[in-house]
């Protein structure tokens, strides 16, 4: 009989401790890691794009980069609060897309500037050709 009372008390303790243990383990769920490197890379790319004055040539891409990094930051904050690893992965991907958009804006601006210089050089070359022909008495 004493054994039955002891077994019954142990069983009740187990029933009480089990939910406490489960709640404790749930509370210890790891907080997802904020993608700091991706955020820094996006910020750097956006800053470089701004310094390169890409807004004159690729404002849509630069605007997209800014919007994506802002969304990524907001999503990462929510992911930390909710301990949501999938949301943090999405935030990381948004930050990477932001960096890509900023780099695309910079590349488009560089291309536009190069095309502008190329066109100017062609005009100058044509003017020089015409001047040489005039000086030699030859017309085109």
Image: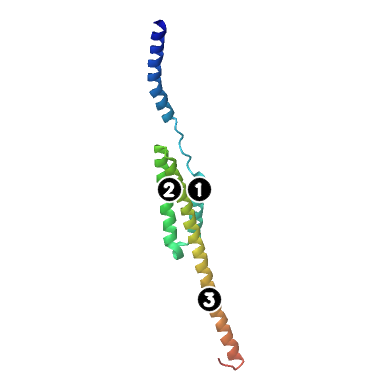
Above or below, 121 against 97 in this view is below
Above or below, 98 against 132 in this view is above
Residue at image position (42%, 57%) is: 64
**Residue indicated by mark 3:** 120
Above or below, 102 against 26 in this view is below
State the CA–CA distance, disc 1 to disc 2: 10 Å
Lower sequence index among marks 2 and 3: 2
Lower sequence index among marks 3 and 1: 1
Element class at badge 3: helix
Front residue of 88 and 2: 2
Residue sticking out furthest to the bottom: 137
Residue at image position (40%, 22%) is: 18
Image depth: mark 3 or mark 1 in front: 1
Image depth: mark 2 or mark 3 in front: 2
Residue sticking out furthest to the top: 2
**Residue indicated by mark 2:** 72
Q: Are marks 2 and 3 in contact (CB under 8 Å)?
A: no
Q: Are marks 1 and 2 in contact (CB under 8 Å)?
A: yes
State the CA–CA distance, disc 3 to disc 1: 39 Å
Image location of residue 138, percent across then percent down: 59, 93
Residue 83 in which image quadrant: top left
Residue at image position (40%, 5%) is: 2
Q: Quadrant of the N terminus?
A: top left
Residue 24 in which image quadrant: top left
**Residue indicated by mark 1:** 38
Lower sequence index among marks 1 and 2: 1
Front residue of 115 and 27: 27
Which disc number belongs to residue 111? none
Estimate how packed mark 2 is, as few (under 14), some (14 to 19) or many (20 or more) residues with alpha carbons within 10 Å: many
């Amino acid at each position: 009989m004493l054994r039955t009372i002891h077994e019954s008390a142990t069983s009740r303790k187990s029933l009480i401790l089990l939910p406490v243990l489960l709640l404790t383990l749930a509370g210890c769920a790891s907080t997802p890691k904020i993608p700091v490197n991706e955020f820094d890379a996006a910020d750097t790319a956006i800053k470089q794009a701004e310094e390169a004055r890409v807004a004159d040539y690729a404002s849509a891409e630069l605007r997209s980069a800014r919007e994506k990094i802002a969304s990524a930051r907001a999503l990462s904050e929510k992911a930390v609060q909710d301990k949501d690893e999938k949301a943090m992965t999405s935030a990381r991907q948004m930050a990477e897309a932001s960096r890509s958009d900023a780099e695309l804006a910079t590349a488009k601006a560089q291309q536009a500037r190069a095309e502008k210089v190329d066109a100017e050089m062609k005009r100058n070359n044509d003017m020089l050709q015409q001047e040489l022909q005039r000086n030699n008495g030859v017309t085109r």
